[in-house]
Amino acid sequence: MLVTSSAPLTRAYDLAMLDLDGVVYVGPHAVDGAAEGIAAAREAGMRVAFITNNAARSPDAVAAHLTELGVPAQAHDVVTSAQAAARLARDRWGAGARVVAVGGPGLWTALREAGLEPVGAADEAVAVVTGYGPDVVWHDLTRVAVRIRDGLPWVASNTDYSMPTAYGVAPGHGVQVEMLSRFSAVTPDVAGKPERPLLDETVRRIGGERPLMVGDRLDTDIEGARKAGFDSLLVLTGVTGLAELVAARDELRPTYLATDLGGLCVAHQAPERRDGAWVLGGWSATCDGGRLVVRRVAAGGGDGAEPAAGDWWRVVATAAWSHLDATGEPADVTGVDVPDVADAGEGADAVDA
């Protein structure tokens, strides 16, 4: 269940590890309010790292894109799954090791910076490291598939099954990983979320003793935080909607939930159980006969102010998860009127700290 933080998250944690797509930007455009939320977190003294499962782009390219969107960033603020994969390979096979690299420029750069020697698919090597690359050719994949089957150790940058593109959602590196794995009957060591190497690499590079993972995906960002033992903040500016949220199993549930990155700069109150319902900030939620029911209630103070959208999502999540744990079935959300989060920042969600 969700957790209460009496202090703003910028004071409770000293490092925010921000997923990119769906949190900071969506394709070529910044998420509304993201730049302001990140600037406020930095002003409050919080370290900010930008982490991504995308192994194709270099940290320099990612930082340049962020800066263009109004989020100032340097290459050292960015940590990629390619860098985490390179760390895995370096720790296992040592500096100077020759490894087959199948992926984009970001993967080759990360391997070189880690002190490894990336080589082609047919060259002598002690291991293979794969990552997404738009120009990877079938000949290299087939050669690597045979070598993996015949015993060459394999590290994969990530297993994301899909990725956003300018022309719609497209197959991600996870599709390639699945193909190689099915052919070779080998499961790779994975560096990216939801596995923990990327998060560990971020803390190693950026620093911080109290890290907070911030993401929009339950099955990578939040599950990855849970596996690493880190607290997490789910924001609703990306792929997670009502259906995904109410069906989230325990290992996919965040510590905190907010409509956007403004949630970093406020305190968080968890819903309370009252008379069989979960209540917070002017909203009440129950599951009646398996159906989710959300009602307006008198907000604290009774001043008639519009209840915060963030509190709506928090009571809904808590009621739905309680029902899921008790029955094993997700709540029926048919007919539930979802508030528009696009116009609902987190400023009204603060509690007196």
Image (cartoon, grey):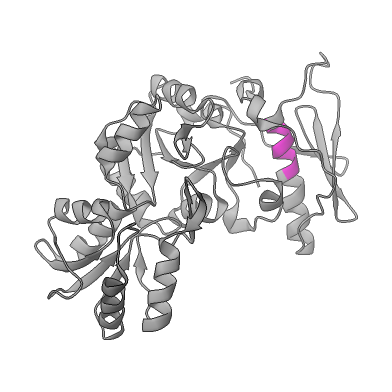
Depicted 344 relative to depicted 148: above or below: above
Give the residues drawn in magenta, as a range.
310-316
Question: Where in the figure is residue 213, as x and y percent of width and height?
Answer: 46, 43
Q: Quadrant of residue 32?
A: top right
In magenta stretch: residue 311: yes
Left or right, 48 with reference to 270: left
Up/down of 16 relative to 93, above or below: above
Q: Is residue 185 visible?
A: no
Q: Is residue 154 left or right of residue 306?
A: left
- In this view, the residue in front, 219 or 251, is 219
Q: Is residue 250 left or right of residue 202?
A: right
Q: Nearer the viewer, residue 242 or 174?
A: 174
100 versus 204 height, above or below: below
121 over 326 or under it: above or below = below
Name the image quarter holding the C terminus: top right
- Furthest-left residue in this view: 96
